[in-house]
Image (tube, rainbow, N blue to C red):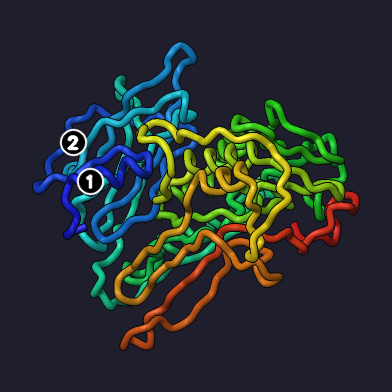
Amino acid sequence: MSSMNRRTFTKLAVAMGATAVWGDLFAAPSRVAWRERRGFFPEGVASGDSDSGSVLLWTRCPQAEKSSSAELSVEVSEDQSFRRVVARAITTVSACSDWTCRVLVAGLQPRRTYWYRFTDRNGNGSRIGRTITAPSLDDSRPVAFAFVSCQNVNQGAQNAYRRMIFEDERAAEADRLGFVLHLGDFIYERVWYPEDRPQGMYDRRLRDTVRYPDGEKIRDFHIPTTLDGYRAVYRAYLHDPDLQDARARWRFVNMWDNHEFSWLGWQSLQKFQGKTRPAQTRKVAANEAFFEYQPARMARPSGNSLERFSPPKVVDAPITKFDDHGLGQEANNLAAIGSLKGYRAIRWGRNVELIVTASARGDGDSRRGPRLQWGQASGDDPFRQRQRGNSQLLQEPAFADDSRSGTEGVVP
C-alpha cells in the first residue's frame, strides 16, 4: 500500500463495493460508547484478503423492517481494549445488501495484529474481531496458514474450526496462523430437511439449519431458486459458533467451488435427474450472495454503489454454442459468469504468493473448482512457494451421478 495514494485507494474500494477508510498517523483512544451486543450482529464479523497495508472488514447488522438503511461506526485498533485506535469511519448497511457491509481499511502496518469492531448509533456493538496484515514483500520469515473446504452444516457441526482455534491460541507467536485459505463449498446449497430424510446421512442426524423461502424440492432435498434463498443459507452457516469464531480470529481468503452455485452446476447450467437446464438468474443470485457475505477483493463489472451488488439483468436461456475451451457463448451465460470476477493474486511476504484464477481448462482435468497446486515460483529463492486455485467450472462435472436415490456412494 505504500505506493498507492488515497485517490487510487478510493477507486479500488468502490470497485469492490467497500467503504474506504485510511488509517490515522497517530493512535488515539476510542471515542465510541461501545457495548457488546452480539444479538444485533447475529452473523458475527470477518476480515479477508489483507495485504501489507490494508484489510477488508465485514459484518451484518439487520435493522427493523421500517428502516431501509442504517449507519455503523467501524474502528480498527492496535490493542484489544481500543485505547490505540488507528482507523475509524462510518459505513452503511441497507436492505438492498441484506444488511451486510464491506469496509476496506488502509494505512496499516505490515505483519501487524489489529482488532476491529462495529457499533450502531445506539452503542450496540459487534463482537471484537482480530485480523493480521500481510508481511512486507521482502519479509522472508516463515509463513503458517491452513486451508479448508467443503463444510456442510446441514450434516454436522463445524468443530474442526474449534480445534484449529484451540491449537492456535496455544502456539508460539511465530507459529500461529497468518490466514485461512478457503478453497470453496463454504455453503452447500443442497439442503435436506430432517423430515424428508429421517434416516439421516452417512449415519449422521441431519440438522435443521435452513428453510428456503422459495426453494425447489428435487427428490428428497431442496435447492435455492432466488437471491433470498442463497442469502438464507449463508446466514444459517454463519450461525454455527465455531465457524463464526474462526472468521473473527483469522482473515480468510475465500474462493467458490460448485456448491456456492449448484451441486451439478458449471458455468450457469444446472443438472438434476439427468436433465441439464439453463440457470443464469440463479448464477447471478449465487454470485451476489457470495459477494455480500464474503470479505474478498472481488471486482464487480457494473455499478459504482458502495451498498449494493448491482447485478446484470439476465434470463434463463438455452446455451447451445461453446468455444474451443468449452465456454458457452450465449450472452446471458457470459453476463452471469462475469457478474463477479474472483481471480486475484495475494502475496504474503517473500515466500508465499496465492494465485486464484477465474477459469479452468476445458478438458477432463478441470472437473472440479479450486484446487491446491504447489510448485516453485520463478526467482532466486528455491523455497518461495506459489499456490494456484481454479475457481470456475467450464465443463460438465463427471464426478457424480444424480440419477441415484440419495447420495450413497456419490461424491457430494
The residue drawn where x is 46% and y is 33% is: 310
Front residue of 230 and 73: 230
- Residue 268, x across and y down, in percent: 65, 47
Would residue 39 be visible to someone looking at this image? no
The amino acid type found where label 1 is placed reads Ser
Identify the mark nearer the N-term, 2 or 1: 2
Which quadrant of the rendered structure holds the N terminus?
bottom left
Name the element at disc 1: strand
The residue drawn where x is 28% and y is 78% is: 140
The residue drawn where x is 35% and y is 25% is: 124
Name the element at disc 2: loop
Front residue of 45 and 253: 253
Q: Left or right: 147 with respect to 133?
A: right
Residue where numbered disc 1 is placed: 77
> Which circle marks residue 30 in the picture?
2
Q: Left or right: 21 with respect to 332?
A: left
The residue drawn where x is 34% and y is 47% is: 56
Count residues near mark 2 (Cα–Cα under 10 Å), then give few for <14, some for 14-19, many for 20+: some
The amino acid type found where label 2 is placed reads Ser
Q: Cα distance, mark 2 to mark 1?
A: 9 Å
